[in-house]
Image (tube, helix red, strand yellow):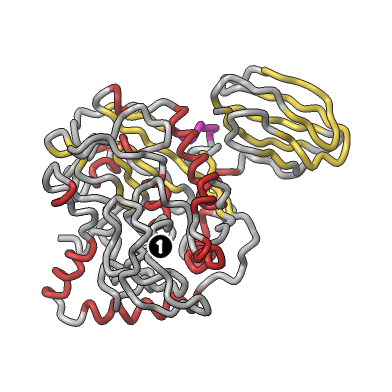
Amino acid sequence: MKKLLITALALYTTYTYAQVHKCYTHELMQHQEELTPGYLNSVEETFYRAKQTFSQDRSTVYTIPVVVHIVYNDPSENLEDSVIFNQIEVLNQSFRRTNPDTVNMRPVFDPIVGDAYIEFELAQIDPNGQPTTGITRTSTTQTSFLGVGGFPAEGVKSSTDGGIDPWDQSHYLNIWVCNMSFAGTPFILGYATPPNNLSHWPPGSADNMSDGVVIQYEAFGANNPNALDLGQGAMDVMGKTTVHEVGHYLGLRHIWADGDCNEEDGIDDTPNALDQSDFDCDTTKNTCTDNILTYGDLPDMIENYMDYSSETCQNSFTQGQVDMMRAILENERIDLISGNPATIGENQALNFQLFPNPSSSNTTIAGLEQDVTIWVYNESGQVVFETKASHQLSLPVFDAGIYFIKVVSDNEVGTKRFIQL
């Protein structure tokens, strides 16, 4: 069996919240301790080694190419492009801390939260070097992938088992979206794999698991038309299940460290907690006494994406978590951001900025230092807009979809892709 099932956001054995297993990580760690005594001690030792590799760079923006694999049996599971675009937007807002709900952060945490300077874009070039939307769609005969191809739902990552094989996992963040229900009720909301043998994760954390993120289809995107109902009514879905799981993919552990007040997640500035939140936003909890840097004893941080609080109150990562994720990108996952063929379709010979991207309104082209001609193409290669400009230009609002911008000067060419929501 696998040594450890990591980062399953919710394992449900019944239809009631009171009996929900939100994550089975800690139970499996305890099982491994029974098989190999001393295992938990080795886990504790690795926490402290992890901090030695923290990134010192908090300003360079790292962009991660993403491929979203929609694997569906029922038409309701075949989510529209607009849901995928929205999820990418939620990821970008969350990791850049531009999400509007940061205003809900309690002031006591203001000194420790931060911008990760990590962004996400749907891949422009597929593994065969061909242009792509960064989205695949696979019809399957599997009504649920729970337990298919190995627990929890590894079959979705395999064409043989009715899913779809991953794209090059060193150069793409693969996100599979599928059904992981049991008897019609979602059994797992999501799970992810950190890099194998990561220092502050237990040894063998990702053994026998194919790299990437898997999300229950109702929990994907903030504009998902499917209600997420675990048996007691619809839950708030704001796309933060995916944020949580991508945090795991970039090396973060649960903020309560799957233990008690004596357990740590390897991050100095995350407050200790006795246990995870229960899909709530209880601001009265201070379940552990801790001394974080110069900030003293902080309450339980329900605002942290790596808790199990309600998505309505999750809004930030801490600066320590930012340092960890950036260190992972500079080391174990450096192929995602260095010489990545997934983004070679973007020619930076003529550099310009494009923001916001994705956008639900006007997109601005900035940083044009000379007169240029601008073409906007749709996915079919048709020119939908053409003009001349210099310095800065606000594009019109197009129909929802993926577009490519080509900017040409006398001797340089630059291309970028943007998403109109």
Instruction: Relative to 320, say whether 244 is above or below.
Output: above
Q: Position of residue 207 (x, y in %)?
A: 27, 62
The quarter holding residue 233 reads: top left
The quarter holding residue 394 reads: top right
Q: Is residue 132 magenta?
A: yes
Instruction: Relative to 125, say whether 51 is above or below.
Output: below
Image check: 42 left or right of 404?
left
Q: Position of residue 128 (x, y in %)?
A: 49, 38
Q: Which quarter shows the N terminus?
A: bottom left
In the depicted view, which residue is nearer to us: 10 or 246? Answer: 10
Instruction: Relative to 56, say whether 164 is above or below.
Output: above
The chief SS type of the magenta part is: loop
Q: Is residue 403 magenta?
A: no
Q: Position of residue 237 (x, y in %)?
A: 36, 39
Image check: 63 left or right of 250?
right
Is any atom of residue 92 visible in this view? no
Q: Secondary structure at mark 1?
A: loop
Q: Position of residue 313 (x, y in %)?
A: 41, 50
Residue kind at label 1, given as amino acid type: Met
Question: What residue is shown at x 66% (from left), y 36% (from top)?
Answer: 416
Question: What residue is shown at x 33% (from left), y 82% (from top)?
Answer: 45
Q: Which quarter shows the C terminus?
A: top right
Badge 1: few (under 14), some or many (20 or more) residues near its Cα, within 10 Å? Answer: many
Q: Which residue lies under the disc numbered 1?
A: 301
Question: What residue is shown at x 21% (from left), y 39% (from top)?
Answer: 230
Question: What residue is shown at x 37% (from left), y 65% (from top)?
Answer: 300
The magenta-colored residue range is 130-135
